[in-house]
Amino acid sequence: MENGEGATLHAIAGTQDVGGHVTGNEMERVYNGTFVKSSLTRDTYAKLKKACVNDICPLCGQGTVHQLDHYLPITSFPVFGVTAINLVPTCSDCNKYKLVHVPTTVAEQTIHPYFDAVDDERWLFGEVVNGAPAAVRFSVAPPASWDEVKVERMRTHFRIYRLGALYATHAAVEIVNMRYALRKMAATAGFEQRIRQNLRGRAESCAAVYENSWQRATFEALADSEWFCASGFDET
Ligand SMILES: [Zn+2]
């Protein structure tokens, strides 16, 4: 716990066994063959998977939770193989992307949803890419109040889980879906302002739920883009 709260989990030395008796492979079999599957522990496994809102993966904020991820990989840290705070609900993609990412410095640690409070401030922003169709590029722009380590860890998290590509894909679908409605709004004079207000309203509504959602960043970036509000929304 002390290492988690101090963001120094990377400093815990990995071991190939547990107490010199149980090997890492054996702990993997305990986890995969018993903890995940046994009728005696299935409920506990399910409860840990439910430790998130609406079954949404806390690592990307988008995917559906399908499994648990060992924050400290079981291959290097078999001693934490079935430790609850080391088991983070995750979607399949996030679990795959992280694989055996073993941070060697504090800045290489991804965000641990049980220990790290990163949604206390705004950090996710979007920028419109003018094109046919319009697109949104996402980036991490942490607040000035964060220290250097927190900033770097957020960037590591964004990179390891490929959040930029994930959010850009979903934003692209959103832009296509709103085209019909925006075309209707563009039928009369002064439409740029109406479209901008509409997009701002959507951004505010999303921000009220979750400040760092890709939806909020998308609507805000689109509202800020004169090109998008004037004609970009109609580009195909
Ligand atoms: Zn995920």
Image (spheres, helix red, strand yellow):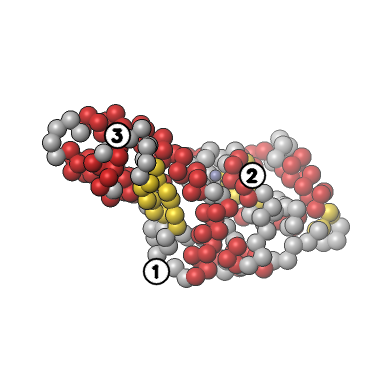
Residue at x 64%, y 44% (from the top left corner): 96
Q: How many discs appear?
A: 3
Quarter holding ligand 1: top right
Mark 3 residue's CB less than 8 Å from ligand 1? no
On screen, residue 48 above or below 105: above
In front: 32, or 122? 122
| Horizontal side, residue 126 vs residue 106: left or right | left
In front: 236, or 95? 236
Secondary structure type for disc 1: loop
| Residue 153 x %, y % | 54, 62
Q: Earlier in the sequence, mark 3 or mark 2?
A: 2
Q: Quadrant of residue 139?
A: bottom left
Residue at x 81%, y 49% (from the top left corner): 25
Q: Earlier in the sequence, mark 3 or mark 1?
A: 1
**10 Å neighbourhood of mark 3: few (<14), some, or many (≥20)?**
some
Numbered disc in front, either 3 or 2 = 3
| Horizontal side, residue 48 vs residue 221: left or right | right
Secondary structure type for disc 2: helix
| Residue 170 x %, y % | 44, 39
Q: For the residue marked with disc 3, what is the amino acid?
A: Asp
Q: For the residue marked with disc 2, what is the amino acid?
A: Lys
Q: Look at mark 2 in the image and give the residue it sits on.
A: 96
Q: Quadrant of residue 102?
A: bottom right
Q: For the residue marked with disc 1, what is the amino acid?
A: Ala
Q: Look at mark 1 in the image and give the residue it sits on.
A: 144
Q: Earlier in the sequence, mark 1 or mark 2?
A: 2
Q: Quadrant of the N terminus?
A: bottom right
| Mark seen at residue 234 | 3
Residue 58 visible: no
Numbered disc in front, either 3 or 1 = 3
Q: CA distance from mark 3 to mark 1?
A: 37 Å
Q: CA distance from mark 1 to mark 2?
A: 32 Å
